[in-house]
């Protein structure tokens, strides 16, 4: 044991004398606050430029609507009303409808007509035009059958649905009433789900949102509105999925297994909480804080990975190249102990750096955004609801990040030992690390059986795989049953463990049994 | 006879198809300086690397201080100190830090010991500078300090005079003699420097193409090949070492010199605490021995170390042959 301690102390000294370490720590220190400050200031910028105002600014909204009107009018002047072409005719018609709707809006409902409404109106006009073209003139436009199907899908799944959408949109545009528009939104969403039960569920979701929050979201903060809408849609889709027994939330339309039912139930629990308490989590500021932490987390992880990769990839080979390994070999120490001490000191420094970066992230969020309450994590698990402080959640995520670092350490150290060339070891590990990121995102599209063929290439980027399911994590057991990339996390964990063991064996074997 | 600290038994090492070391058996005793001689590529470094744990022997056994190197590795290696080829250390650390790191692996906590060896190798002024700023000779000196810091019973130096200035070589020679003859350390030194080896070593082994061709005391090395030749030879007269005197005080080399008549003092000089050297013909040697005995100075042995180590070397290695 004392031998290990001495070895460890020496290896630690070598690691902590690296210039790279200083650069890495500085980068870890600088990134989170920089990201937070820039995202925070972008929110302040939109606030000051008027897109999020505390009270509806009549003049500004008038001006905005007028400018859209002008645009539409200009477009209208390009059309030839006398043209035979049905498509042009329809475009001409829809543009006219949109103009009328906007005009109507400006005259009657501007107090309610917040920016998102106008924006959506214009979006719908574009969709309407596409649908019109499809329905009226698809042959003439030279659409193939698959083009048609794609478009139909966008419009709601079937010819009939598309026609319905079209009719509905036409109506909305024709009367320009706020209520009609809102009904329309309740009816169509980004999911392919439709039907009366879905509508009911959506209404149910909206009803959960406190009135004042609803008002505020609609009127003052367009991103709050969009986020709230996303939550209601998620809620309705999950609710309908449960009732119908098919997964409509993720669009797979696979029958729900009992395990997934539990997951959906837990998700509904979470959504109910969020819908009832939207104030702090759906605002632009809360979203900016969340995004800022996300970006900072990813950047910090990359800095950490690359840093630790270089440290580990050169840790043995550099000693071989400079010859300093001699004083280690001459010492009365079995070689495997030397290797383990090197491994241990790398793992420890990775741990310290991961903890350090977690602390910096948390502090900079706290300082720049004031409060972390908007980032509270709501976690449903086995029918009960848990509300996690953000720092707890972030700590979990730092632990998962550490797992990635650990795998990299095992990998890079083994290659460094086998090749005895720093350049080769660092190059191979870097290539492997970034190559795997790309490979995994490609493989994510495969079914689980196909994905298995690529098994040796996957699961290395442990944390990104685990993180997306971390929001639903309470215990490791439940965690392990959450399928990711079509392979269960438990399996991934086992795989990574075996992989680490294998890499350790390769590194040890090469270090202990080869001549120097 | 003193015990064998290093024992090599039938060691063979092959690199691909080339046998770098071929059935080599030899031992180095406590208290002697063993010279390992041979042309480039003879297998000296390869042998030393096997003893120091760098290379794995194909066949044979290595024993250090009574411990089998493969089965009691850490105990065996705890007895060894040395330098293989060039001393390489951590350039980003100071000489002292390097020594501390190494000493730590030997479980050595005594800071004074580090100061002691640093002074011994004459590096006390610059030991706190980073090693990457050292010259080759300075690195050799710190390397030597590192090899000595844990008081090894076996000291192995691969071409230690490489990069040392004349002063350094002289100090090294004295240091090694002192370690071997006074402290009973077994010293193994490889070199091409025949003259150097002749002055330094008690025994030499000559290796070529991996095979140990000849081992003999340096005095006899000359006698065997060039015996009977007339003229001057270098003699080494060793006085009775204090440890052999059973508690009585014995005169050292300086006292022995003082006991000689005026005229002899230019011819004879003290080479270490307990040895004299002189270049004499056989006649003169008889006279000198007589004088010493008359003065009551106990002798332990007289070695005959003529310049013909070179002759021996060339005749054994087949002088001038190209590389294996
Ligand atoms: N790692 C190795 N791989 C292959 N052959 C090697 C290796 N190390 C040494 N050799 C060969 O083994 C033989 C002995 O080399 P060694 O270094 O022991 O010689 P040496 O006696 O120390 O020579 P020098 O006086 O030049 O230092 C040489 O022929 C050399 O080419
Ligand atoms: Mg050599």
Image (spheres, coloured by chain):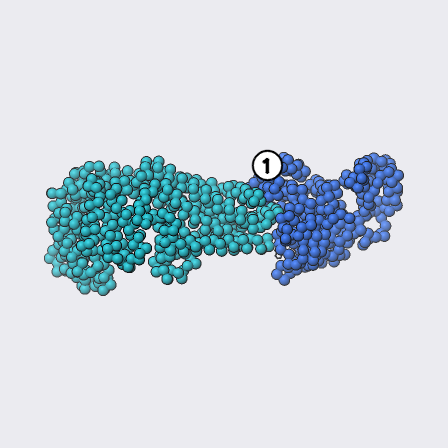
* Residue A453 vertical placement versus B304 (above, below): below
The answer to whether any part of residue A1 appears in the image is yes
**Residue A331 drawn at (x, y percent):** 61, 46
Helix, strand or loop status at disc 1: loop
**Residue B128 drawn at (x, y percent):** 59, 36
From the viewer's perspective, is A222 left or right of A24? left
Residue beneath the point at 86% across and 50% down? B230
Residue beneath the point at 86% across and 41% down? B288
The answer to whether any part of residue A323 appears in the image is no
Of the 4 image quadrants, the one containing the C terminus of chain B is: bottom right
From the viewer's perspective, is A179 left or right of A462? left
Report the residue marked by disc 1. B128
**Residue A167 drawn at (x, y percent):** 14, 56
Query: Numbered disc 1: what chain?
Result: B
The hue in which chain B appears in the rendered picture of the protein: blue
What is the quadrant of residue A363 in the picture? top left
* Residue A436 vertical placement versus A3 (above, below): below
Residue beneath the point at 39% across and 60% down? A452
State ligand 1's quadrant.
Answer: bottom right
From the viewer's side, name the closer residue of A101 and A177. A177
Number of labelled discs? 1
* Residue farthest toward the front in the current orientation of the protein: A383
From the viewer's side, name the closer residue of A152 and B129. A152
Q: Residues within 10 Å of mark 1 (few under 14, many from 20)?
A: some
**Residue A147 drawn at (x, y percent):** 23, 62
The hue in which chain A appears in the rendered picture of the protein: cyan
């Amino acid at each position: 044991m004392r031998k290990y301690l001495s070895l460890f102390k020496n290896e630690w000294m070598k690691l902590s004398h690296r210039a790279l370490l200083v650069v890495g720590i500085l980068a870890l220190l600088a990134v989170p606050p920089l990201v937070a400050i820039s995202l925070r200031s972008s929110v302040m910028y939109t606030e000051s430029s008027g897109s999020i105002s505390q009270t509806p600014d009549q003049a500004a909204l008038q001006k905005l609507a007028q400018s859209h009107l002008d645009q539409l009018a200009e477009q209208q002047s390009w059309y030839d009303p006398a043209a035979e072409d049905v498509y042009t005719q329809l475009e001409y018609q829809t543009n006219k409808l949109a103009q009328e709707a906007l005009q109507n809006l400006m005259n009657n409902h501007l107090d309610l007509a917040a920016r998102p409404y106008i924006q959506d109106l214009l979006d719908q006009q574009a969709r309407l035009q596409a649908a019109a073209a499809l329905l009226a003139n698809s042959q003439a436009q030279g659409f193939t059958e698959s083009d048609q199907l794609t478009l139909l899908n966008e419009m709601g799944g079937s010819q009939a649905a598309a026609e319905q959408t079209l009719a509905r949109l036409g109506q909305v545009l024709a009367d320009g009433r706020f209520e009609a528009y809102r009904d329309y939104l309740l009816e169509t969403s980004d999911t392919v789900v439709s039907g009366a039960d879905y509508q009911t569920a959506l209404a149910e979701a909206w009803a959960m949102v406190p009135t004042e929050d609803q008002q505020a979201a609609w009127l003052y903060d367009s991103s709050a509105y969009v986020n709230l809408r996303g939550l209601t849609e998620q809620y309705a889709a999950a609710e309908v999925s449960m009732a119908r027994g098919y997964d409509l939330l993720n669009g797979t339309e696979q029958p729900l297994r009992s395990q997934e039912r539990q997951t959906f139930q837990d998700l509904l629990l979470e959504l109910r909480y969020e819908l009832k308490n939207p104030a702090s989590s759906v605002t632009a500021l809360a979203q900016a804080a969340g995004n800022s932490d996300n970006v900072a987390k990813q950047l910090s992880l990359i800095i950490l990975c690359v840093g630790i990769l270089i440290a580990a990839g050169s840790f043995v080979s550099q000693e071989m190249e400079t010859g300093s390994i001699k004083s280690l070999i001459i010492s009365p120490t079995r070689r495997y102990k030397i290797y383990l001490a090197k491994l241990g000191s790398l793992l420890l420094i990775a741990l310290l750096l991961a903890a350090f970066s977690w602390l910096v992230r948390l502090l900079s969020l706290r300082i720049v955004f004031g409060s972390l309450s908007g980032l509270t994590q709501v976690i449903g698990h086995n029918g009960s609801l848990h509300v996690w402080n953000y720092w707890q959640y972030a700590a979990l995520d730092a632990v998962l990040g550490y797992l990635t670092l650990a795998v990299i350490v095992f990998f890079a150290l083994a290659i460094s030992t086998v090749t005895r060339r720093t350049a080769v070891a660092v190059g191979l590990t870097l290539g492997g690390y970034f190559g795997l990121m790309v490979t995994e995102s490609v493989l994510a599209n495969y079914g689980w059986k196909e994905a298995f063929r690529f098994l040796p290439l996957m699961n290395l980027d442990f944390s990104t795989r685990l993180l997306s399911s971390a929001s639903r994590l309470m215990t490791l057991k439940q965690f392990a049953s959450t399928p990711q990339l079509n392979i269960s996390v438990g399996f991934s964990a086992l795989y990574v463990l075996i992989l680490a063991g294998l890499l350790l064996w390769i590194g040890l074997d090469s270090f202990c049994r080869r001549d120097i | 006879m003193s015990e064998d600290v290093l024992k090599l038994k039938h060691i063979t090492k092959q690199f691909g198809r080339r046998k770098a070391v071929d059935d080599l058996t030899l031992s180095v005793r406590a208290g002697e300086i063993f010279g390992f001689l041979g042309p480039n590529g003879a297998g000296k470094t390869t042998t030393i690397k096997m003893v120091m744990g760098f290379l794995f022997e194909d066949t044979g056994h290595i024993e250090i201080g009574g411990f089998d190197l493969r089965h009691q590795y850490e105990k065996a290696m705890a007895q060894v100190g040395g330098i293989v080829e060039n001393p390489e250390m951590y350039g980003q650390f100071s000489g002292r830090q390097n020594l501390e790191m190494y000493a730590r692996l030997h479980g050595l906590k005594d800071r004074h010991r580090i100061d002691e060896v640093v002074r011994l190798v004459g590096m006390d002024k610059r030991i706190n500078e980073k090693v990457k700023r050292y010259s080759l000779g300075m690195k050799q000196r710190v390397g030597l300090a590192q090899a000595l810091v844990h008081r090894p019973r076996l000291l192995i130096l691969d071409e230690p005079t490489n990069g040392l200035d004349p002063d350094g070589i002289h100090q090294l020679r004295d240091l090694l003699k002192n370690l071997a003859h006074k402290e009973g350390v077994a010293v193994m030194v490889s070199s091409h420097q025949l003259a150097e080896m002749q002055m330094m070593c008690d025994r030499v082994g000559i290796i070529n193409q991996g095979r140990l061709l000849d081992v003999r005391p340096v005095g006899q090395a000359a006698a065997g090949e060039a015996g009977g030749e007339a003229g001057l030879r270098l003699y080494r007269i060793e006085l009775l070492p204090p440890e052999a005197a059973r508690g009585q005080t014995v005169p050292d080399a300086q006292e022995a010199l003082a006991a000689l008549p005026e005229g002899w003092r230019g011819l004879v000089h003290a080479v270490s605490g307990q040895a004299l050297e002189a270049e004499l013909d056989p006649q003169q040697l008889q006279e000198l021995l007589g004088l010493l005995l008359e003065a009551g100075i106990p002798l332990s042995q007289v070695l005959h170390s003529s310049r013909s180590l070179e002759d021996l070397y060339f005749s054994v290695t087949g002088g001038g042959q190209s590389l294996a």
